[in-house]
Image: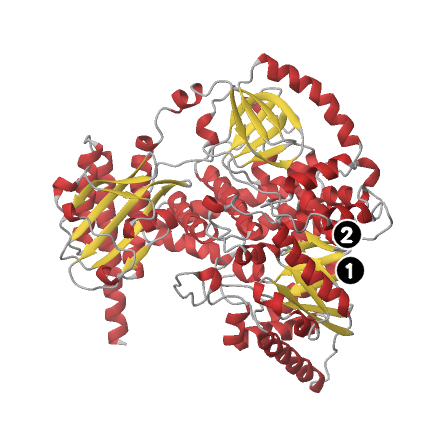
Amino acid sequence: MGVIKHSLKRKKEKNQKSQDVLGEFKKLVKQNLSTEEKLNLITKLTAQHLKTDACTFYMMRPGEVLELYATYGLDKKSVHETFLRIGEGLNGEVALRRKPLQVENVWSHSGFVYKPETKELNLNSFAAVPVIHQDILIGVLSVQKKEQYRFSEEEIDFLLIIAMILSGMLLNLLTHNEGKVASARRHKKLDAVCLISGLAIGKAYVHKRMQFDSILSSDKLAEQKKLIAAIRKVEEEISQKLLLPDITHEQAEIFKTYLMFTRDKGWAKKINNAIEAGLTAEAAIQKVLNEITERMSMMSDPYIKERLHDFQDLAGRITRHLNKKQVKSSKRLAKNTILVAKNLGPVELLDYDLNKIKAIVLEEGSQTMHMTIVAKSLGIPVVSGIKDITTSILNDDVLAVDAVNGFLYINPSDEVLDDFDARFETYKQHQAQYLPFKNQPSETKDGTYISLNINAGLAADISNTKNFSYDGIGLYRTELPFMSATSLPDLKEQISIYKTVLKEVGNKKVIFRTLDIGSDKILPYFENKKEENPAMGWRSIRITLDRRIILKTQLRALIKAGAGRELNIMFPMITTIDELKEAKNLLHTELEREKEKEGLLPSSVQIGTMIEVPSLLFQLDELTNEVDFVSIGTNDLAQFFFATDRSNPIIWDKYDSLSPAFLKALQKILTACQKKGIPCSVCGEMASRPLEAFALLALGFTHLSMNPASLGSIKAVIRTTNIQEANHFLKNHLNDSDASLRTLLKSFATDHGVLI
């Protein structure tokens, strides 16, 4: 007991010392000193508190370059003379990945770059954190020691808090005069990604999330009380929206999901821990949000990535109440407003007067984000993918949004405005073509029925599709509940999750994909091995076959949840037939176990596999003997097929899934399945995009699974396609040497009246 008391006493003393140092930082920031003088003092204080031999700060500069801006312990002459590219050296890696890094021996690390002018020759251990303000990278703060040393979690947390102090202090240096930047962009035409089709002209209103000034606090209890009160206010606010008479079912389900977020104990615990460390409630929320952003933004799965916007939305709302600021913004809007934002949550959107919003322009966003679903139900056009849009536009700039062809015009010329007026009428006529298909079966012009299914991962996804006609869930991502939990869900929790899903869909089929984690899908409570190439490393079925208790528990939960009805289980990332057989044996063992316990078994069990790895293209005969169905994950299959990292924007447009080679690979899989009489579906992004879906129909696919938001547009493609004509056309071009058949397919579809 004496040892424990002594340990607790030391920890308390250490925490108190950290808070005293943070208090010094707070005073320092307010002093009438130049930014450089403040940074020099901050690096010195940081090094002294952590007992390191050096502390440096690299500032982000235009052209994705880091400039050594302040240092304690390195040669002062290297300040403003040392530069790193993003991704270069250890500091550059922190800037690239936007996550903390620590290395016990820098000289043995493959990423280390020695800069002679700094004279860091005798320094060995290293730790660094990114300095970020609301997704804007400002710089990197790092510390170094002479001896080999592993920095503790508390020391990394201390650096993260210092980084937050720096972010508020340095933001103005990075975001120069926004007005000058925006006003220089007169009559500008920018490329955009269409999320919701439409045309609109109006005045810009730039949406910005709530910021805060206070970072440190000495009154923990007061901050915790403020936090509880703010969360309650947000819960009341969302609950009131649920009572609105004109609320749609989709909006109601999203609000319910938000209420679940506000009541998540794991999230609240992390915020309280940050308050205990000496942060204000506002800063604590931002710290936790930064950690979530760091983890989720590195993921390539667009569905999972979009949940990040929900967390950002919720954090912003709580922060507003902590600052006692008004949430409503509708009074500031012009009659025809184009809302501009980096990203936007659904509740943030509904705070505005929606009658005044004619379109939404985003820097980040996709069709799976909740805001897009809400905007679609309201008939508001949305475009995204425009970098630095919030600093490129001033409030009241005139914007013309072309969410049909994917363009944004800033302060358009009179000629562009005249053209828009003419196109409005044409667009209305085009949209009217979709109405007849809404309640019709998904059948092609020549009578082929296409099974339309959805990809889902949360109960809200299923609820959001109740107004659509679809056949089932072609892919249920079981990892989503695991990723939102603070610890590994136990058997009881998993049974409850899977029962809820089955109840939501009624008699429709659900295909449960077993846990697909690793690579970019990181569980915060799970062992995450550092790998050079995680996409091709220890992930998915490889993890669950190595940690069999995880897979066995999940299979047991699925069997119990599916009692008395058909159960469909699909194994991901299968590379060899042996892996598939191992997974099947575990499933059969759990079925026998339930049978011996005299439990109610599923009426039937169908076993399938994802085809995501090219090696299976050469094992199709053996594979189709082992499964009842196959689903092609085109996202990963294309990534490995073309050796293209799909999370790397530099090479996104280098290869096309509509290339003859890739289409022939898909045809090879389909032919093998047809030979054995087993269903073959496509559940990757290809099935969600109209032109790609048209190509899949032309190849002969009759089972598609997609993002719920794509159901309407894909049904229009199906209803206007003649399979025989499309198949004959595509067959004649599969041996072309072109890099892509995109242009040819688009021309054919347009000429034959296919609504792509």
Tag 1's secondary structure?
loop
Position in image of residue 191 (x %, y %): 54, 31
Residue 592 image-quadrant placement: bottom right
- Residue at x-position 62% and y-position 54%: 662
- Residue at x-position 81% and y-position 43%: 719
Tag 2's secondary structure?
loop
- Quadrant showing the C terminus: top right
Q: Is residue 217 visible?
A: no
Q: Residue furthest bottom?
A: 596
Amino acid at pointer 2: Tyr
Residue at image mark 2 = 470
**In 3D space, how far apart are the residues under numbered discs 1 and 2 (Cα atoms)?**
9 Å
Foreground residue among 271 and 96: 96
- Of the image marks 1 and 2, the number of the one nearer the N terminus: 2
Judge left or right: residue 318 versus residue 113. right
Foreground residue among 527 and 414: 414
